[in-house]
Image (cartoon, coloured by chain):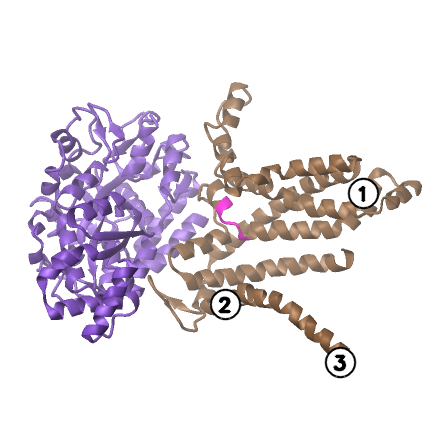
Chain colours: A brown, B purple
Amino acid sequence: MAFDTSKRSSYFLITPMAAIFAIFLVIPLLTIVIVSFWDYDEYRILPDFILDNYSYLLGSSVTWKIYLNTLKYAALTWVFTLSIGFTVAYFLAFHVRSLTWQIVLFMLCTIPFWTSNIIRMISWIPFLGRNGLLNSALLNLGIVDQPLEFLLFSDFAVVLADVHLYTLFMVVPIFNSMMRIDRSLIEAARDAGASGFETLRSVIVPLSKPGIAIGSIFVITVVMGDFITVRLMSGGQSASVGLQISNEIGLLQYPAAAASAVVLLITVLLIVVGLLRLVDIRKEL
Amino acid sequence: MTIETKKSRKNLLSDTGVSRRGFVKGAAAVTGAAIGSGAITGFPTIWAQNIKNVTLRQFGTGVSNINAVADKVKEDLGFTLQMTALDSDAVAQRAVTQPNSFDIADIEYWICKKVFPAGTMQPMDTTKLKNYEYISKLFIDGKLTPDSEIAQGTAPHTVGFVEGADSVKFASAPTQWMTLIPTIYNADTLGIRPDLISRPITSWADLLDPEFKGKASILNIPSIGIMDAAMVCEAMGEVTYGDKGNMTQEEIDKTIAVMIDAKKAGQFRAFWKSFDESVNLMASGEVVIQSMWSPAVAAVRSKGIACTYQPLKEGYRAWGGGIGLAKHLSGLELEAAYEYIDWYLSGWVGAYLNRQGYYSAAPATAKKFMSEDEWGFWMEGKAAQGDILSPEGKVMEKAGAVRDGGSYEERMGSVACWNSVMDENKHMVRKWNEFIAA
């Protein structure tokens, strides 16, 4: 009897969560999958079962170009956010000794997040522009004699904005992992004669892996699905998968957008699965 | 319509026991059927009293959904006009799929071409419109003046009339049954920064002139961007078109190929999608030549930066919208709608629109509501005598200014192509995406 009651109460307790997942995740996802097989014309979507949306999507060279471009942004952003994020977290966790200062500096990192995402992005535009602050400064200092055009409306600008926006997503989980590292392990490494770099390589990095994996998942999924950064910072000249989906929605081509979304979802899930294979987050948490 | 009146009509309906008309559903059914009952009992004198209880729901794109118009309607005609602004894709979709959600549709002519055949709207009886005769000839037979050439694309007069009261087939010549009465229209061209460009700009081809490498922009809304691209390609002599408003796949492919080459050569600084983006690109000097909309040019100038809405020898790309009646309108509401439309043509709105830099459907009536100086500046291409004010009272131009492109006849008389939707729309959008991704 006691077993039954506890089993029943467990079911009862998970019901709200299960219901929320079903309503807000499973049902919308299923709808997207279903709609991706529908047909459409200029103004309507027509219930049907066709594979055209997928065959066009997967057969078009544009799609491959767009995916390559999106992956490029994701990879570059990942490399930079990881190196910056790891360095910052390392500094906070091992060089700042007092807990108060750790908290103060950590809060400092989050201050930019008090303003809107879009504002932080848009503020780069007057800074990097042809007649922007940076170019004016460089010209006045005589470092360049022509304004640097690549600074804005370019891949450089997109990656810069992405790195700026998402580095904190790396800092937080890595910092969290590092704080859990038993300090005596580092002492032991030093006693065993390991140099600073060797300690980093064989003690700190392996033990920070869960944080790195979580941060990477954050950054990669966000950049893979992003459209507004790419649109604003490339001046509309580059495409990303998210931008393609947003364009299709704008043109009322919902089934095509749904098919793109499904393919993107699968791609991102594959990346996440790959990452989880490398690092067992659950075991190491 | 307020909830109270809806309720009272509902009671009235059940008391008189008027049968419902099958196709009317939901809230619209209540109003529609109640009005039907009014028509059956037939006391026209009651209409005049009831008309102030009428609410007409108008939806359309932002440009012509002006609150000042709704306020003036209340003042002049006594009934309520409820406006909803949507983007043009949503407007088109709603007009087709939710026919009872609106009474007046404010749509562009190219949308009309797709929407009207769906049968969710009814044509207007022009004999009921006192001001019909003042509507610009551009919308009647496509010719502003007897010797002007009819432009390509979805020219408004080609979708302006249907063959009969219940017809959804567009008539080849004017009939008694009009689909839309025009509200706002204008002629678009390239905007330039005359302070940063040293030579005169005369042709659409200048957009791709290597001189402006890295300083040009084009708008990234496929259905309009492709037209601007076509104007450019035709001006360069790279592509010849049967009809720029309805290109063949081959014409689309060639046009996009030219644009991709230009993009790869670094011609474009950016592409813009929203009004603000075009203003910022121009005002910051990132771009010195680009496709632009008239109010955006005004916005750049209001920052004290020189910007010209450059007339070009190949002509303008024009667009226009109009208002039309929902199919379900009948009885009192239909009368109110006719009254509203006639009032729209009677001059006050026209003057308002003219002062914004657009054009009104019936210029002759608008003239009565404008000062001589205003009329001279906006419509006749004359130098302003005093400050030219926007409808909100903001100074738009100082004394001595002349409108870019000149008079109404000069601008609307040299339209090369109207905004349109192509038969090969899907193909066009895909090719356009290739251009953006290239």
Residue highlighted by disc 2: A33
Cα–Cα span, label 3 and label 2: 43 Å
**What residue type is disc 2 on?**
Val
Q: Are marks 3 and 2 in contact (CB under 8 Å)?
A: no
Q: Are labels 1 and 2 on one chain?
A: yes
Number of the front mark, 1 or 2: 2
| In front: label 3 or label 2 | 3
Secondary structure under the numbered disc 2 in the rendered image:
helix
User: Which of pointers 1 and 2 lies earlier in the amino acid sequence?
Assistant: 2
Residue tagged 3: A1
Question: Does residue B414 appear anywhere in the picture?
Answer: no
Identify the mark nearer the N-term, 3 or 2.
3
Percent from the top left, x then y, of residue B95? 28, 61
- Is residue B422 left or right of A90 when viewed as pictured? left
Q: Residue at x 33, y 52 (%)?
A: B86
**Counting other residues with Cα less than 10 Å from the Cα at mark 1, is it few (<14), some (14-19), or many (20 or more)?**
some
| Disc sitting over residue A185 in the figure | none
Q: Residues within 10 Å of mark 2 (few under 14, many from 20)?
A: some
Q: Which residue is mark 1?
A: A200
Query: Label 1's element?
Result: helix
Q: Do the residues at discs 3 and 1 belong to one chain?
A: yes
In this rendering, position of residue B424 left or right of residue A271: left
Q: Is residue A12 visible?
A: yes
**Looking at the image, is A245 positioned above or below residue A2?**
above
Identity of the residue drawn at 72% across and 41% down: A89
Residue B36, by quadrant, is bottom left
**Type of amino acid at the residue the image marks with label 1:** Leu
Q: Quadrant of residue B304?
A: top left
* Residue A85 position within the rendered picture, expressed as x and y whole percent measured from the top left: 68, 42
Question: Disc 3 to disc 1, how far (Cα)?
Answer: 54 Å
The chain under label 3 reads A
